[in-house]
């Protein structure tokens, strides 16, 4: 019973780790709620009135969520600097509250400075956020010079509560976060394999659902891999360890994605296009009406389940003869003589299982250290030797010089600061026409829609989502205010619940976050005895006004149109794709390609930025349906290109140590067309008037003369490289049509 209970807790924890990689959302919500609860407990113990309790709760929330730095020492420094900034801000708010013109001018200047401060990194962003939010707090609680001493004490207690929650009760170190992210990666890897295990037996009525689940879990695995990439530098003490983890995570991700493609191909009439895994609503590969009924099907199902256990099982539970036998059997599929009698496509799946098992072994060695080798078979021993040789060959690349940033009005922070200053000025003027008491809600909305946005379209979508969440929150706030009445601590308890929900849901849905914020404000107004249905309706009006002012300012003041923003990011993706492809093929041809894994991750990050920037173009409310479909198609093709680029980079990095791969100089000439076409498309996107054409011609494989090396393992690996090059060539050519690039003859 104890073992069953422990197993259930492990499964629950794995699900939580997979849904919230690194437990970042859970930690943010719990830390903020804990800081507020500590602040309220101290203030209540000394008999502070309810309005000061509300001020303390808001200050504790701001002091906690504003700080985003990863290193505890830097967090402490920013928190210490934030206290005098907060005291100065609340002082100016109280002193200028009665002077309308001077107060408004200072508020606009504060908003400009807070946004401009983002150019100084996380600390500048945090201090600007604290200054703005505490000034807003002074307006919310109607601070006056006479109340300043009490507010100083409340804010001091709030910052102390935030420090206690952050550094004592819920400490979070970069190494700990990285460790939780790695656990999340394993959990999401196991979830993806569980979805893949459904493919062989999925009937015609089920395959669409399974395929959609496969797409979702593949994307989530990639998201976690990128999060790990962002934490490696701070979470490891040795650059060599960071480099090793980066490679092993990349290997596992590529092996898992390739296994899914092989499974789809095994149940299809022809080889599956990689686009199937990246384009929502893509047609199911032909021939899927008949699930796999090969004689090796039962072994395939068994081994997929075994691979999932192998990926998921932590080091402490990974010992024992049974698990070692499973690992040995899967690694044995890397040898041709161990493959079962089956069709070539199904045999490819077993090869993919062997490569995934090898990636699992490498990941386990990198994360958990040396393992028991007493039960190793010769195939397992060879895999360990290959991994050891790769580890020894890792070199730390030199730091790249930072790219030159725009200056003057072209600098994003300067442009955003001017835009939000103009929008806030309009929001102040319009907000005071709606209400001389609560005009600041319009300013807050205008400020918020500029956070983490870079184009007019992004601001428009964010404003729409905030307005929708506010309307729904007003309805909930009216109902909750009637239920809570004057039960102070019940209201505060609900406020804490909503704050946790707000932080936990923020990365998932901005609309949902806005709903919880507005419902919480209804309770705060009840606590301040200023609640009425008219007040919450006024919040909707002020929110709509603030969003409109933000969109207007973004469209008029130094505008960055969505098309321009996405084109710039698209060129960046294409440039990095060309860089990865050129470097990988150079190394596969016998040259040196540099740090290919790092280049592949830069490509992935650029693609993630592009995907986020295209959200306004793919949003369900967009009236341009054909354009939305074209954007989705282009992004899916780029994701396909990135997958093949990652695979080429990972294969090329094996060359110095892997006995089954040898350099082939013919590849350099064969891939020249691919790089040329990528650069031609990038040039056309950057300047539509550029006279460029893509080249067409025979397949990559047919461009290579028959080789002299005929060993089965060499042929298999070479075939894999050629498949990636061929698919990359096809995907790049496919990009030309929606982007308006014409084709030309082959050279």
Image: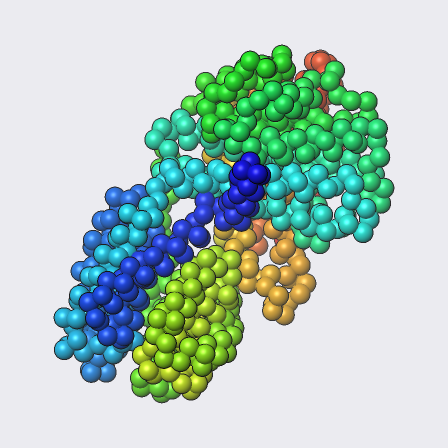
Locate the N terminus and report the quarter of the image it occupies.
top right
| Residue nearest the viewer, comparing 226 with 557 | 226
Of 326 and 449, nearer the camera is 326
Tell how many labels.
0
Vertical placement of residue 676 versus 146, above or below: above
Is residue 346 at least partly visible in the picture? no
Residue 647 in the image, given as x and y percentages of width and height: 60, 32
Residue 82 point in image, percent of width and height: 23, 57
Q: Is residue 701 left or right of residue 88?
A: right
Residue at 35 percent across and 71 percent down: it is 489
Question: Residue 497 location in percent, x, y?
Answer: 42, 64
Asked where in the image residue 159 lies, by quadrant, the reply is bottom left
Residue for point 67% across, 53% down: 280
Q: Position of residue 372 (x, y in %)?
A: 52, 18
The residue at the point 37 percent across, 83 percent down is 531
Q: Residue at x 29, y 71 (%)?
A: 54
**Left or right of 702 on screen, residue 631:** left
């Amino acid at each position: 019973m104890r073992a069953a209970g422990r197993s259930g807790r492990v499964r629950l924890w794995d699900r939580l780790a997979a849904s919230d990689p690194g437990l970042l959302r859970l930690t943010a919500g719990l830390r903020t709620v804990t800081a507020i609860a500590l602040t309220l407990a101290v203030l209540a113990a000394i008999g502070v009135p309810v309005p000061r309790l509300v001020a303390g709760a808001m200050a504790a929330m701001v002091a906690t969520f504003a700080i985003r730095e990863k290193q505890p020492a830097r967090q402490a420094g920013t928190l210490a600097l934030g206290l005098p900034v907060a005291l100065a801000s609340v002082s100016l708010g109280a002193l200028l509250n009665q002077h309308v013109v001077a107060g408004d001018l200072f508020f606009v200047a504060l908003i400009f400075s807070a946004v401009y401060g983002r150019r100084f990194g996380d600390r500048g962003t945090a201090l600007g956020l604290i200054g703005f939010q505490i000034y807003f707090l002074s307006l919310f609680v109607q601070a006056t010079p006479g109340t300043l001493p009490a507010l100083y004490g409340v804010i001091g207690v709030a910052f102390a509560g935030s420090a206690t929650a952050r550094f004592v009760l819920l400490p979070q170190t970069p190494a700990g976060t990285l460790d939780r992210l790695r656990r999340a990666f394993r959990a999401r890897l196991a979830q993806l394999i569980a979805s893949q295990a459904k493919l062989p037996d999925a009937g015609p009525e089920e395959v669409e659902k399974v395929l959609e689940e496969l797409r979702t879990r593949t994307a989530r695995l990639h998201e976690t891999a990128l999060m790990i990439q962002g934490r490696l530098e701070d979470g490891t003490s040795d650059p060599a360890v960071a480099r090793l983890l980066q490679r092993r995570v990349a290997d596992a991700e590529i092996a898992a994605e390739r296994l899914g493609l092989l499974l789809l191909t095994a149940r299809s009439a022809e080889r599956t296009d990689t686009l199937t895994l990246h384009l929502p609503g893509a047609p199911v590969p032909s021939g899927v009406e008949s699930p796999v009924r090969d004689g090796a099907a039962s072994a395939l199902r068994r081994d997929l389940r075994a691979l999932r256990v192998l990926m998921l099982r932590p080091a402490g539970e990974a010992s024992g003869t049974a698990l070692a036998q499973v690992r040995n059997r899967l690694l044995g599929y890397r040898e041709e003589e161990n493959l079962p009698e089956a069709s070539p496509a199904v045999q490819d799946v077993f090869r993919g299982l062997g490569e995934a098992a090898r990636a699992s072994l490498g990941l386990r060695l990198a994360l958990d250290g040396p393992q028991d080798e007493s039960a190793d078979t010769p195939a397992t021993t060879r895999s360990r030797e290959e991994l050891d040789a790769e580890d020894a060959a890792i070199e730390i690349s030199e730091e790249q010089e930072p790219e030159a940033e725009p200056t003057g009005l072209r600098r994003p922070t300067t442009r955003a600061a001017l835009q939000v200053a103009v929008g806030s000025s309009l929001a102040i003027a319009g907000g005071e026409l709606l209400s001389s008491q609560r005009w600041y809600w319009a300013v807050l909305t205008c400020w918020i829609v500029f956070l983490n946005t870079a184009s007019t379209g992004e601001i428009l979508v964010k404003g729409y989502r905030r307005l929708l969440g506010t309307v729904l929150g007003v309805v909930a706030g009216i109902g909750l205010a009637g239920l809570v009445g004057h039960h102070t601590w019940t209201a505060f308890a609900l406020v804490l619940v909503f704050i946790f929900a707000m932080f936990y849901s923020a990365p998932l849905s901005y609309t949902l976050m806005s709903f919880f914020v507005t419902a919480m404000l209804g309770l705060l107004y009840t606590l301040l005895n200023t609640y009425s249905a008219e007040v919450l309706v006024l919040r909707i009006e002020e929110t709509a006004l603030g969003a409109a002012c933000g969109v207007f300012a973004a469209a008029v003041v130094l505008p960055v149109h969505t098309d321009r923003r996405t084109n710039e990011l698209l060129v960046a993706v294409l440039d990095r794709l060309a860089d990865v492809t050129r470097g990988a093929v150079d190394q596969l041809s016998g040259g040196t390609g540099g740090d290919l894994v790092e280049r592949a991750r830069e490509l992935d990050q650029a693609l993630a930025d592009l995907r986020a920037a295209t959200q306004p173009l793919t949003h369900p409310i967009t009236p341009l349906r054909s354009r939305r479909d074209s954007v989705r198609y282009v992004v899916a093709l780029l994701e396909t290109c990135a997958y093949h680029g990652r695979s080429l980079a990972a294969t090329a990095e094996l060359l110095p140590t892997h006995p089954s791969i040898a350099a082939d100089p013919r590849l350099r000439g064969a891939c020249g067309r691919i790089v040329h076409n990528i650069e031609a498309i990038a040039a056309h996107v950057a300047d539509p008037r550029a006279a460029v054409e893509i080249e067409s011609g025979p397949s990559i494989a047919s461009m290579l003369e028959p080789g002299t090396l005929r060993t089965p393992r060499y042929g298999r690996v070479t075939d894999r490289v050629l498949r990636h090059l061929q698919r990359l060539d096809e995907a790049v050519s496919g990009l030309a049509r929606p982007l308006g690039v014409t084709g030309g003859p082959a050279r």
